[in-house]
Amino acid sequence: MSEVIFDLENVDYTYLNKFPALRRVSLNIRSGQRIAITGANGSGKSTLLYLLDGLIFPCQGRISFLGRELKENDFNDAKFCRDFRKNVGFVFQNPDVQLFCPSVKDDIIFGPLHLGFSRKIIQKNLESVCQILNLTDLLDRQPHQLSVGEKRKVALASVLVISPQILILDEPTAGLDPLTTRQIIDLLMFASAEGKTVITSTHDLHIIEEISDTVFVFNADKRLAAFGETKKILGDPVLLKENNLAHIHTHRHNDGIHLHAHEHLEHHS
């Protein structure tokens, strides 16, 4: 059985000591898994990802990484922090959070430079990710000159250039055109095929069908409502409807307009 990377036990998190974001969450994620984290807006998906990336820490309960409890003071240890950041890559939902350098190239190489990668490795990885994401012609551009889709790809490149074993992505395809969405899905599938652990937060059920083998569903009460194999979760219309994940379609008939839920029993292209 594969190694447990993240283990959460009864984790609570509250913003400003008064806004609950997660309640009593227990789960584990193993090496090589393809995880989708889904739920309606405000159900705690992003908060969970921040916890996994060591950006915030539980108010109650515990979270472990490779058997070691993650605590804020751990990141004051330069070696631990460097090793963790080399292994765990995070792509924020808002790419502007990650893009702050004068040029696209500077943004992409910022991480490996500060993690001590050699110039030779940085150049090799830069060329590779730019070819994969078709970013070569954008390297001298300023990030604010890019489209939303281009920004998302640059943010993703800034993580892939480090070649982490664990990828954590927060709504990576939100608001993107179909072609860019397809490119990112293919990239995540390729990363998984290489043995990387891929953890993606999304409420797009069509994406989930391709990028995950296991799904965690969060509810409006900020709790883990269900988890299991992707086909099982997507084949449960009651669960999806209860957690505001069922797609509703409007159809006009002779006697008026009717609403029908769209069940995700198989992939729809």
Image (tube, helix red, strand yellow):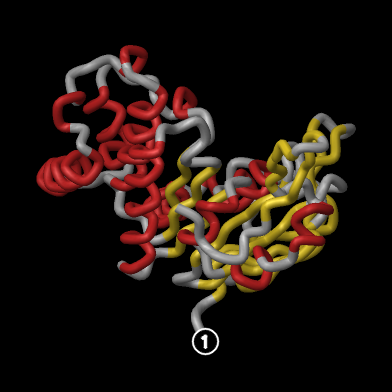
The answer to whether residue 202 is above or below residue 26 is: above
Q: Residue at x 15, y 26 (%)?
A: 137
Horizontal side of residue 228 vs 244, given as left or right: left
Residue 68 seen in the current view:
no
Q: Is 125 on the left-hand or right-hand side of 54?
A: left
Q: Is residue 126 left or right of residue 60?
A: left
Visible residue check, residue 157 = yes
Q: Is residue 126 left or right of residue 55?
A: left
* Residue 230 figure quarter: bottom right
Instruction: Name the residue furthest bottom.
Output: 1
Q: Position of residue 144 (x, y in %)?
A: 36, 13
Q: Quadrant of residue 133?
A: top left
Q: List x then y, in percent, for residue 209.
A: 52, 61
Q: Residue at x 44, y 33 (%)?
A: 176
Q: Residues within 10 Å of mark 1 (few under 14, many from 20)?
A: few
SS at mark 1? loop
Q: Position of residue 23 (x, y in %)?
A: 84, 52
Question: What residue type is disc 1 on?
Answer: Met
Relative height, residue 161 to residue 152 (above, below): below
Residue at the image point whose x is 34% and y is 39% from the top? 179
Looking at the image, the residue that sits furthest to the front is 254
Against 185, residue 142 (above or below) is above
Q: Position of residue 10 (x, y in %)?
A: 81, 62
The residue identified by callout 1 is: 1
Residue in the image at 41% along x and 24% along y:
148
Total marks in image? 1
Foreground pick, 246 / 202: 246
